[in-house]
Image (cartoon, rainbow, N blue to C red):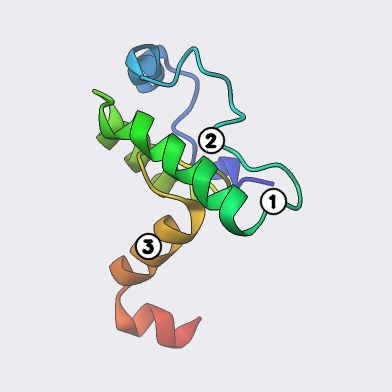
Amino acid sequence: MSDVSRLPGSAHHYWQWQARAACRDLGSGRFFHPAGERGEDREVRDEAAKRVCAGCPVRTACLEHALTTREPFGVWGGLTEEERRALLDDRTPARVKQSA
């Protein structure tokens, strides 16, 4: 389950970017893998999602949302959950990593 304590709240202006997202009418199946999906099938789906993200006018806002909320699943802002996790690890100062 996602940690909703980091969500910015229900204020409309926080979510306006979603109305301009390239994925808004595509459904979630392209961006979130089904249970048990592995290997080439997952890679193909992730690459298809990333192609949509590549031309998206709100890609940066989407990625920042996913990083801020620590979104654990799916492709957001052109990055998979593994890629976002690695990016967050790179952003974490060494002193915080050592105490964790």
Q: Is residue 37 above or below residue 92?
A: above
Q: Circle 1 is placed at which residue position?
A: 37
Q: Position of residue 67 (x, y in %)?
A: 40, 48
Name the amino acid, label 1. Answer: Glu
Q: Circle 3 is placed at which residue position?
A: 88
Report the side of 44 relative to 89 (left or right).
right
Q: Position of residue 96 (x, y in %)?
A: 39, 78
**Residues at discs 1 and 3 in contact (Cβ within 8 Å):** no
Q: Earlier in the sequence, mark 1 or mark 3?
A: 1
Distance from disc 2 to disc 1, alpha carbons, whole Å, reads 12 Å
Foreground label between 1 and 3: 1
Q: Earlier in the sequence, mark 2 or mark 1?
A: 2
Quadrant of the rendered image containing residue 16: top left
The residue closer to the viewer here, 80 or 37, is 37
- For residue 76, say whether it is visible: no
* Residue depicted at 34% across the width and 84% down the height: 95
State how many labels appear.
Answer: 3
* Residue depicted at 51% across the width and 81% down the height: 100
* SS class, disc 2: loop
Report the side of 32 relative to 18 (left or right).
right
Name the amino acid, label 3. Answer: Leu
* Residue depicted at 37% across the width and 62% down the height: 88
Q: Circle 2 is placed at which residue position?
A: 31
Mark 2 surroundings within 10 Å by alpha-carbon count, few (fewer than 14), some (14 through 19), many (20 or more): many
Q: Is residue 53 above or below residue 66?
A: above
Q: Position of residue 54 (x, y in %)?
A: 28, 34
* SS class, disc 1: loop
Distance from disc 3 to disc 2, alpha carbons, whole Å, reads 20 Å
